[in-house]
Image (cartoon, rainbow, N blue to C red):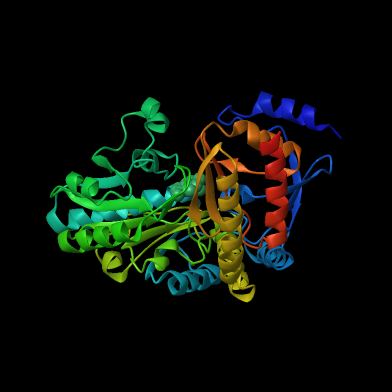
Amino acid sequence: MKNMQEYIEDAEKALLHTYNRYQVVLDKGDGVNLYDIEGKRYLDFCAGIAVFALGYNNQRYNDALKAQIDKLIHTSNYYYNVPAIEAAKKLQKISGMDRIFFTNSGAEAIEGAIKAARKYAYLKDGTTDHEIIAMEHSFHGRTMGALSVTGNPKYREAFEPMIGNIRFAKMNDFDSVLANVTDKTCAILFETVQGEGGIYPAEEEFMKKVRALCDEKDILLILDEIQCGMGRTGYMYAWQRYGVKPDIMTSAKALGCGVPVGAFMMTERIGRNSLTSGDHGTTYGGNPLAAAAINIVLDLFEENHIIDNVKAVGEYLTGKLDQLAAKYDCIETRRGIGLMQGLVFNKPVGDIIVKALSKGLILINAGTNIIRFVPPLIITRENVDEMIDILVECLEE
Ligand SMILES: *Cc1c(COP(=O)(O)O)cnc(C)c1O
């Protein structure tokens, strides 16, 4: 077998250089631990970026997927299949949304949400130059539509022109949203808790004011729950904490816990007045294998009381991170909810993350100065203690 360095050299000769990867070749996972091809163990506080909520190598999850593989992996959305029907019904129940469209990824869910909002506005007045308000520091994905609403000019610049008619407001600044509203505004879009942009939770008052504005002007509220959804904040979807229901929402990442799947969902009213037969489609979205993943994930969330664990261990993690923030001058603050947390440093965190990796801890950044904590939702207090011990070692060095 090749050693790790040889594999990395092979990778750098074959893969497009769009990532500066950490110098490790991962091989297998078990619970909250990952192992590289040389057998070294890592405690994982990244979970494939908020994906592997149930941890690695969950036997029930694996068995459900294997059974579906032996039965039927793919059909086409021109036919019904039982796993997708069941998954849609379960999603209706946990999200309070009425109409579900399955996608392959988060970005594709955002594309669908944008199309639904534009179609809704088009059906109302027959014109086509409607505007969407998105937020600064947002992240919605890398396809052209999703990039167009991503509030980081660095990601967009080389790929202009974007889809157009997008305005950016400041998150948690209602006046800035209001200042961007015109009679062409068809949707206001944001992440209930901003992820990549720096772990900024929406404030309750902001959520409520935006909802009221949307109701008053018949603007659609689209919430991106791709990272903050699926239990991560201690609620199945983060907006449920505020009681502010969107008209359209997106989900992905932990939705399939590793099988690539996403969804955009909407209320019955929007479902009846937006996308219709022939307006949208996907070859793979919600195929039997992907849907089987959603079904077993949602079953295991319930059986294993995942939400309760997030609330309990999330509070514990919050306390521990607050202690670090108080103790170390290089840490400015902590932000986040539940098991979606960020430690904001007054300097770049790349070195700390590389050091942690060498000590068997996987962390991820959000922007240059923030360490993001998005572990599997099954982590225990002991796992948090182990993570904190390693992080402290890195900070002391
Ligand atoms: C990851 C992410 C996306 C994009 O999802 P992909 O599956 O990578 O396309 C969109 N929105 C948010 C909030 C995300 O965190």
Name the quadrant of the N terminus. top right
Q: Position of residue 382 (x, y in %)?
A: 72, 60
Q: Is residue 191 depicted above or below 150 in this figure?
A: below
Residue lying at 12% horizontally and 55% vertically, measured from the top left? 125
Q: Is residue 252 left or right of residue 361?
A: left
Q: Decide which of 228, 354 is in the foreground and name it.
A: 354
Whether residue 374 is visible here, answered yes or no, is no
Q: Is residue 212 depicted above or below 6 in this figure?
A: below
Residue lying at 59% horizontally and 51% vertically, measured from the top left? 323
Q: Decide which of 335, 379 is in the foreground and name it.
A: 335
Q: Decide which of 384, 30 is in the foreground and name it.
A: 384
Q: Is residue 374 left or right of residue 175?
A: right
Q: Position of residue 219 (x, y in %)?
A: 21, 57
Residue lying at 31% horizontally and 70% vertically, measured from the top left? 268
Q: Is residue 5 left or right of residue 121?
A: right
Whether residue 338 is visible here, answered yes or no, is yes
Residue lying at 45% horizontally and 58% vertically, measured from the top left? 263
Q: How many marks?
A: 0
Q: Quadrant of residue 209?
A: bottom left
Q: Quadrant of residue 239?
A: bottom left
Q: Position of residue 127 (x, y in %)?
A: 14, 48
Q: Is residue 2 left or right of residue 273?
A: right
Q: Position of residue 313 (x, y in %)?
A: 61, 63
Name the quadrant of the C terminus. top right
